[in-house]
Image: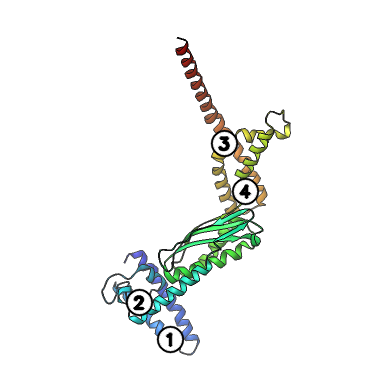
């Protein structure tokens, strides 16, 4: 096995041995704990001998997902005893039933949104994570989470259960989405066992509090007041309306860097950070408009005018 994998299993087994030794020394000798400790010692010896992860029957590699879930396994799936196979099948059935019970309602409506999803696992227990959480029981926004959890089978189901409860607890606190994911990441790192992780995308419905939403509102206001003289108070609105395309193309650069600074510094109210990011998008959009989009627009219009004049000259000829 690779050195990185060996280091991982070495650390996991030594940590397990440390916990078992402490449990045995602190209480009366429990035969089950003593037997489990001997299995951990045997796994460490196999790791030192270079035979860890090999089936003791056929000497082929044991399934990696099973090793990550339980480093003490000694046989591949093809060489499990009848009793072990029945126990594994029972565990998978229970894990599959639990995983199905954690899936959100197939069709739900909240805050004007109609949510529907399709979840089709390849096996009895999937490593895919799917969740829809209605804020305030449907009176607020709609959070959606899509991702993949580490491992397969029972271990994946347990991690999915942990994420299911974790995000529901954090969403009830009503923190910003960036802080929500940061807190979830810290909790998962502190509570998950070695080798467990999740890769996921989390989003929240609604257009409130975003630069893009504000830009859309400005475009609508600009469309209403088009043709009017306008006052000084509408000048910023009209400017953003005229340059909404340039701001849209470039605002993510400011948003990403501003978000990174906010996450690292955590100073000042979030509203001031939002206002600063909004103001910084204007000069960047202005630069793109002045040196790219407007010159390109003039060139395209000029080329069109030349083609039109040439066509009229040919017709008159």
Q: Is residue 20 left or right of residue 246?
A: left
Q: Which residue is mark 4?
A: 207
Q: Residues within 10 Å of mark 3 (few under 14, many from 20)?
A: some
Whole-number angstrom distance, CA of label 2 to CA of label 3 = 61 Å
Q: Position of residue 200 (x, y in %)?
A: 49, 58
Please tell me which residue lies in front, 104 or 270: 104
Q: Which residue is mark 1?
A: 32
Whole-number angstrom distance, CA of label 3 to CA of label 4 = 18 Å
Q: Which residue is mark 2?
A: 43
Q: Residues within 10 Å of mark 4 (few under 14, many from 20)?
A: few
Quarter of the image for residue 16 reads bottom left
User: Quick check: marks 4 and 1 in contact, CB under 8 Å?
Assistant: no
Quadrant of the frame with the N terminus: bottom left
Q: Position of residue 179 (x, y in %)?
A: 59, 57
| Coloring applied to the structure | rainbow
Secondary structure at numbered mark 2: helix
Please tell me which residue lies in front, 246 or 316: 316
Which of disc 2 and disc 4 is earlier in sequence? 2
Whole-number angstrom distance, CA of label 4 to CA of label 1 = 56 Å
């Amino acid at each position: 096995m690779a050195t990185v994998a060996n280091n991982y299993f070495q650390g996991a087994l030594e940590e397990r041995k440390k916990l078992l030794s402490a449990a045995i020394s602190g209480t009366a000798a429990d035969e089950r704990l003593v037997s489990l400790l001997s299995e951990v010692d045997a796994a460490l010896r196999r790791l030192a001998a270079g035979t860890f992860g090999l089936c003791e029957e056929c000497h082929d590699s044991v399934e990696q997902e099973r090793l990550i879930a339980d480093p003490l396994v000694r046989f591949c799936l093809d060489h499990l005893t009848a009793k072990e196979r029945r126990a594994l099948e029972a565990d998978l059935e229970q894990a599959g039933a639990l995983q199905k019970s954690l899936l959100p309602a197939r069709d739900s409506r909240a805050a004007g949104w109609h949510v529907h999803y399709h979840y089709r696992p390849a096996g009895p227990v999937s490593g895919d994570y799917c969740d829809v959480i209605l804020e305030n029981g449907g009176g607020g926004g709609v959070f959606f989470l899509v991702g993949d959890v580490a491992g397969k089978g029972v271990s994946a189901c347990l991690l999915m259960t942990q994420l299911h409860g974790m995000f529901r607890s954090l969403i009830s606190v009503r923190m910003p989405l960036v802080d929500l994911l940061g807190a979830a990441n810290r909790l998962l790192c502190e509570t998950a066992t070695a080798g467990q992780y999740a890769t996921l995308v989390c989003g929240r419905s609604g257009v409130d509090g975003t630069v893009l939403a504000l830009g859309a509102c400005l475009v609508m206001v600009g469309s209403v007041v088009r043709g009017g003289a306008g006052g000084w108070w509408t000048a910023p609105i009209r400017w953003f309306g005229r340059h909404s395309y340039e701001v849209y193309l470039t605002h993510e650069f400011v948003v990403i860097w501003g978000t990174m600074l906010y996450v690292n510094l955590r100073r000042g109210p979030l509203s001031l950070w939002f206002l600063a990011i909004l103001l910084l998008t204007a000069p960047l959009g202005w630069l793109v408009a002045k040196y790219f989009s407007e010159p390109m627009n003039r060139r395209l219009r000029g080329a069109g005018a030349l083609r039109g004049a040439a066509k009229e000259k040919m017709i008159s000829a």
